[in-house]
Image (cartoon, rainbow, N blue to C red):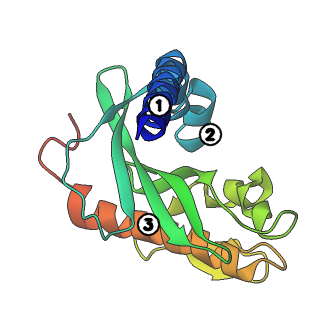
Amino acid sequence: MKENIKLGVILLIITALSGLILGLSYEGTKEAIEKNGKLDKKELSVIMPEAEVVKDKKIELSKEGSINEVLEAYKGDKKVGYLINVTSKGFHGDIQTMVGISDAGDVTGIKIVSHSETPGVGSKVEKTDFTNKFKEKKIEKGIKLTKTPSGKDDEVEGVTGATVSSTAVVGGVNAAIEFYNNNLKGAVGANE
């Protein structure tokens, strides 16, 4: 009986110390974790070059939907568009993409926020060679994926050998466009 109590006290001390160390570690890294979740100026300039600052858009999102977050982009006091964070299914898992859509009705840019695609193949969707193809694409009909270069306003050439990953990114961009068209375009206060 004494042995069980002794082991229980030792376990309690070890658990308490572990909890204290974990709590101190969290407090020490909390600011860095929060900072990593925000867009920096360089990322913002890639997604929406005209924007100077972004603000949270208070909008209720479905937990089952692919839209994770909606931000309003501003240049000074004028809203210039939205940044929509969307998740789509890639070859090896989720691909999270931030999509910039201007109030003028075009995609201003995209950034792959996270993915688990195959290194050297599917991971090429995060390279600027692919992401820059979305700039200034019109959103009326959505974006189509092609296998060859196209000069059309609504087409993007996929990454060779990464059709599933390319399709997932285009699908995510189209989900952001659909959300914009159904929930944000022409909304009251859209051009404040």
| Residue 163 seen anywhere in this rendered image of the structure | yes
Q: Position of residue 144 (x, y in %)?
A: 57, 79
| Residue 185 seen anywhere in this rendered image of the structure | no
Q: Nearer the viewer, residue 85 or 191?
A: 85
Q: Is residue 188 left or right of residue 103?
A: left
Upstream in sequence: badge 1 or badge 2: 1
Q: CA distance from mark 1 to mark 3?
A: 69 Å
Q: Which residue is mark 1?
A: 6
Crowd class of label 3 (few under 14; some 14 to 19; many from 20; radius 10 Å):
many
Quadrant location of the C terminus in the rendered image: top left
Q: Amino acid at mark 3?
A: Ile
Q: Is residue 72 left or right of residue 146?
A: left
Q: Position of residue 41 (x, y in %)?
A: 57, 25
Secondary structure beneath dot 1 equals helix
Q: Residue furthest left?
A: 188
Quadrant location of the N terminus in the rendered image: top left
Q: Amino acid at mark 2?
A: Val
